[in-house]
Image: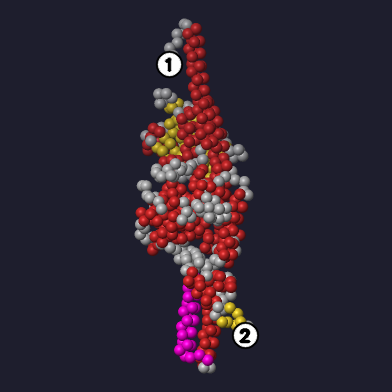
Amino acid sequence: MYQVNPANPAGLAQAECEISMQSADELMQRLEMLNAIGIALSSERDITRLVELILLAAKNLVNADAGTLYLVEGDQLRFEIVRTDSLGIAMGGSTGKRPPMPPIALHQPDGTPNTSTVVGCAALLGETINISDAYQAVGFDFSGTKRFDAANGYHSKSFLTVPLRNHENEIIGVLQLINALNAAREIEDFSTEDQRLVESLASQAAIALTNRQLINQLELLFEALIKLINTAIDDKSPYTGGHCERVPVLTMLLAEACSRIGWGPLKAFHMTEKDRYELKIAGLLHDCGKITTPVHVVDKSTKLETIFDRIALVDTRFEVLKRDAEIAMLRGKISQESYLSQLEQYDSDRAFLRHSNIGGEFMRPEDQERVRRIAAYPWSDENGQPLPFLSAEETENLSVARGTLNGNERQIINHHIEVTIRLLEALPWPKHLANVPEYAGGHHERMDGRGYPRGLTREQMSVQARMMGIADIFEALTARDRPYKPGKTLSESLGILARMAHDQHVDQDLFEVFISGQVYLEYARLFLEPAQIDGVDEAQLLRVAGVVART
């Protein structure tokens, strides 16, 4: 406070000058604060944190004790953030507690505008309302405010209510500040300067909020389109839809585990929110090329399946062989002992082929040779022309060493990753998603350069692409919805994965995190049947993989 002697005009002029300079300095500080707030608003990505930042910034800017931010939702104003410093009230935003107050209707049941509330009036008229004393104001219903004051020993007096208007001149929310405080913590009016500053902040806030909402809506649309692609793949084959959903989840679990570790070669690995989103999108799109893969190949549940399982035709041929043997025995061409021996051999061979028709992890060379011996059984068509018992194509299929696909069909399946890369590289990715094609396109590469489609080595691949490779394999091993095999247990699946790590098929460092961080168990609890979750010897798995635990 300045003491001024009226008899000294020079002193009065000096005091006025000092007050003016102080006001100018204060205004400059507030303008700088407003500028800093604008920068902060433009950089915030999370909607919840953004609306909280808007309210807190407005309160600090004009030293208000309380405030509420409402967002327009349909024909209502929804309480989004509520703060009253002197009462310790904080709801919405980072508190995790939703404001319990019901939304405020912008129109009455008969359709007339509901201008009885200050916030409703500001939203409907698109104008700022500055009230000095709510208890003396005319034309607004403050009964709810008065009940709150009576219940909490509070006095709501000065109100500054500012609509948030977006670039299309639409009201998207309302910012309401209550009780401007002076340096002595006394309630005073919101000044014209306060109003202009808050209106300026509201304008910046509306733009920032609208931009973030638009970005979020575009991201939701983008993810919906990705899910549409995966749904189309799922509609072609139910055996791939679940895979497209589970691989991204497992990839993110492994990525988060790598972010948490403080040891080993991956201790420097870290992801921002943008990095996480980029990896998530890559995971969702990693098999988008399967939309071009023929259904009869994707869904091939047995080695002889095409439109139908041709093992039934093989069964019929065995019945014909047994009939011919019986005729030969009745005609005296072979002995009964020989006949019974042939029947036993035919039944054994038929059972063997039926078993071989079911894909497995490995088929022994001697079993493949037995298929070829059976294929040489004497056989003829209806005209007596000699034919092989099994065609060359049937022999090839029944001799497949792993799974149900022959070489040509496996090339068709493998082609999906080339299609995936081609599709993804053709898209105009924004900067924060520029690595999606590389992440998604590398999950069939190997650390030793013997993978496909590009034969990349470990050093040529990102950590994220290597993560997706482990996730893709482990999901396939444990999946219960494959047409050619049941889901393996944890111990079986991790044993196979450990040998793959040892053979440089998958990354050893990531496998160590996968085991030591118990990523496998976290995933199992989400997606596996209880019967699949058996005991796991982590130390033994790491030894098999050729790594030593460092935890």
- Of residues 448 and 421, the one nearer the viewer is 448
Asked if residue 252 is among those painted magenta in the image, a careful observer would answer no
Q: Nearer the viewer, mark 1 or mark 2?
A: 2
Q: Please name the amino acid that badge 2 sits on.
A: Gly
- Of residues 369 and 358, the one nearer the viewer is 369
Residue 4 falls in image quadrant: top left
Q: Label 2's element?
A: loop
Q: Label 1's element?
A: loop
User: Where 412 sits versus 154, above or below?
Assistant: below
- Is residue 190 visible in this depiction of the protein? yes
Image location (x, y in percent) of residue 527: 44, 58
Q: Please name the amino acid that badge 1 sits on.
A: Met
Q: In this view, does 530 lie to the left or right of 14?
A: left
Q: Which residue is labeled 2 in the image?
A: 384
Image location (x, y in percent) of residue 140: 50, 36
Q: Is the magenta stretch mostly helix, strand or loop?
A: helix
- Identify the residue shown where x is 40% and y is 56%: 544
The quadrant of the picture occupied by the N terminus is: top left
Query: Does the residue at mark 1 contact the one at mark 2 (Cβ under 8 Å)?
Result: no
- Is residue 529 visible in this depiction of the protein? no
User: Where 289 sits versus 361, above or below?
Assistant: above
Q: Count residues near mark 2 (Cα–Cα under 10 Å), then give few for <14, some for 14-19, many for 20+.
A: few
On residue 85, the disc is none
Magenta span covers which residues? Answer: 333-358
- Identify the residue shown where x is 58% and y is 78%: 388
Asked if residue 355 is among those painted magenta in the image, a careful observer would answer yes
Q: Which residue is labeled 1 in the image?
A: 1
- Of residues 304 and 169, the one nearer the viewer is 304
- Of residues 280 and 356, the one nearer the viewer is 356
- Identify the residue shown where x is 49% and y is 78%: 350
Image location (x, y in percent) of residue 456: 54, 51
Q: In this view, does 540 lie to the left or right of 238?
A: left
